C-alpha cells in the first residue's frame, strides 16, 4: 500500500479536538492490534500481556509497547493491558467510534466482490452507496443497495454523509472519479485502480494494488534463489540487489 497525505490529520477536524499525530507505521499497525484484541475479547480474555498481543498481531513486543504508548496506554506491570479499554482507545484513535459512510464507484468484477463483502460492517464501515457509469448496471441490487448512476454522486454523497470513496473503475476513469468525489466533499479515497491520483491538499488517498504486492514477493523469491545459487549461500549475489533489500519491518519505521 502507499499513501499520499498532503494535509496531515491535524487542525481540520471541524470542532473535534485535534488528535496527536502518530507515526504512519504506528497507524498502520493499530488495525492489526484491534483485530487481535477483538479475537482475545471473543475468547473471554479481560487482560493481555504485551508479548501475547504482539504475537497475535505479528509484531515484536517492544514495537507494540512503543506504539501503544503514543495512545497513552502503558498497561499494568504484571497484569498487562485491559483488553476492553485498549479496544476503546484504538477505536477512538482510528475514528471508528463514528460510523463512516463509504461510497463505492465502479461495480464491475472487483466492485461486485467488495459490495458483497459483509466484513466491512463488522469492522465499522457502512457501504452506503454504489455507483457506476454503465446504464446497464444502474438499478442492480447488490447486498441491499441499488447501483446509482455516477451523475447522482454529489446529491447522494450529501444525503448519505459519505466520508470515504472507493474507486474500482478502470485506471482511465479513476482521475475523473476522484475529481467527482472531491467535488462532492469526499476527503478520503481508497484507490484500487492501477494509477496515481492527483488530489488537492487535505484529501487522503490510499492505494491498494495486489499486483504490486505480488511483484514485491517475486523480488524476494528472485533474491532467495539468487542467494542459494551462490557458493556459500547468503551474503553473495549481485551487490546492488542484496544491499537494496531491507527486512520489511525496517521500512518506514
Ligand atoms: N488493486 C487490486 O489489487 C486490483 C485487483 C483487481 C482489479 N483492480 C483494478 O480495479 C479496477 C476494476 O477492475 P474490474 O475487473 O472490476 O473492472 P470491470 O471492468 O469489471 O469494472 C469496472 C466498472 O467501472 C465502471 N466505470 C467505468 N468508468 C466509470 C466512471 N467514470 N464512473 C463510474 N463507473 C465507471 C464500469 O462501468 C465497470 O462496471 C481496475 O482498475 C483494475 O485494474 C485492482
Image (cartoon, rainbow, N blue to C red):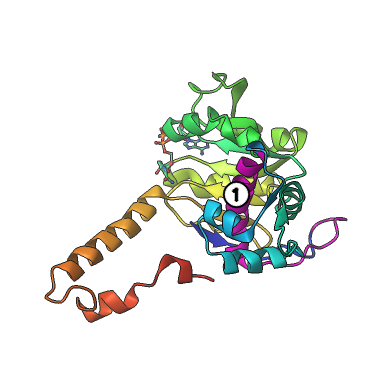
- Report the residue marked by disc 1: 189
Nearest the eye: 248 or 65: 65
Foreground residue among 9 and 244? 244
The answer to whether residue 101 is left or right of residue 195 is right
Per the rendered image, the range of residues in magenta is: 13-41
Q: Is residue 209 magenta?
A: no
What percent of the width, then of the height, locates residue 222? 22, 62
Locate the C terminus and report the quarter of the image it occupies: bottom right
Is residue 89 shown above or below 227?
A: above
Q: Label the magenta part by its dominant secondary structure.
A: helix
Q: Which residue is depicted at the point 33% across and 52% down?
A: 214
Specify whether residue 135 is in view: yes
Of the pair 46 and 62, the residue shown nearer to us: 46
The correct choice, above or below, for 115 with respect to 23 in the image is: above
Please tell me which residue is depicted at 33% across the width and 76% down the height of the picture.
Answer: 244
**Vertical placement of residue 193 versus 68, above or below:** above
Where is residue 109 drawn, in percent x and y? 42, 31
Amino acid at each position: 500500500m502507499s499513501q499520499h497525505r498532503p494535509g496531515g490529520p491535524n487542525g481540520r477536524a471541524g470542532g473535534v479536538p485535534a488528535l496527536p499525530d502518530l507515526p504512519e507505521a504506528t497507524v498502520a499497525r493499530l488495525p492489526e492490534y484491534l483485530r487481535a484484541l477483538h479475537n482475545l475479547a471473543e475468547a473471554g480474555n479481560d487482560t493481555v500481556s504485551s508479548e501475547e498481543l504482539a504475537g497475535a498481531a505479528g509484531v515484536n513486543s517492544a514495537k507494540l509497547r512503543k506504539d501503544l504508548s503514543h495512545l497513552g496506554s502503558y498497561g499494568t506491570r504484571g497484569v498487562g493491558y485491559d483488553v476492553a479499554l485498549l479496544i476503546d482507545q484504538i477505536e477512538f484513535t482510528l475514528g471508528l467510534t463514528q460510523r463512516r459512510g463509504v461510497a463505492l464507484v465502479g461495480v464491475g468484477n472487483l466492485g461486485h466482490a467488495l459490495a458483497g463483502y459483509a466484513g466491512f460492517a463488522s469492522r465499522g464501515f457502512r457501504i452506503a452507496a454504489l455507483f457506476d457509469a454503465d446504464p446497464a448496471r444502474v438499478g442492480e441490487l447488490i447486498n441491499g443497495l441499488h447501483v446509482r448512476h455516477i451523475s447522482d454522486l454529489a446529491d447522494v454523497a450529501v444525503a448519505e454523509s459519505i466520508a470515504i470513496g472507493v474507486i474500482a473503475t478502470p485506471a482511465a476513469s479513476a482521475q475523473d472519479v476522484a475529481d467527482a468525489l472531491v467535488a462532492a466533499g469526499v476527503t478520503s479515497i481508497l484507490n484500487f485502480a492501477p494509477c496515481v491520483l492527483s488530489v488537492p491538499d487535505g484529501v487522503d488517498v490510499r492505494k491498494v494494488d495486489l499486483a504490486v504486492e505480488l511483484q514485491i514477493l517475486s523480488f524476494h523469491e528472485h533474491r532467495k534463489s539468487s542467494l542459494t545459487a551462490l557458493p556459500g549461500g547468503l551474503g553473495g549475489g549481485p551487490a546492488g540487489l542484496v544491499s537494496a533489500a531491507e527486512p520489511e519491518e525496517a521500512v518506514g519505521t
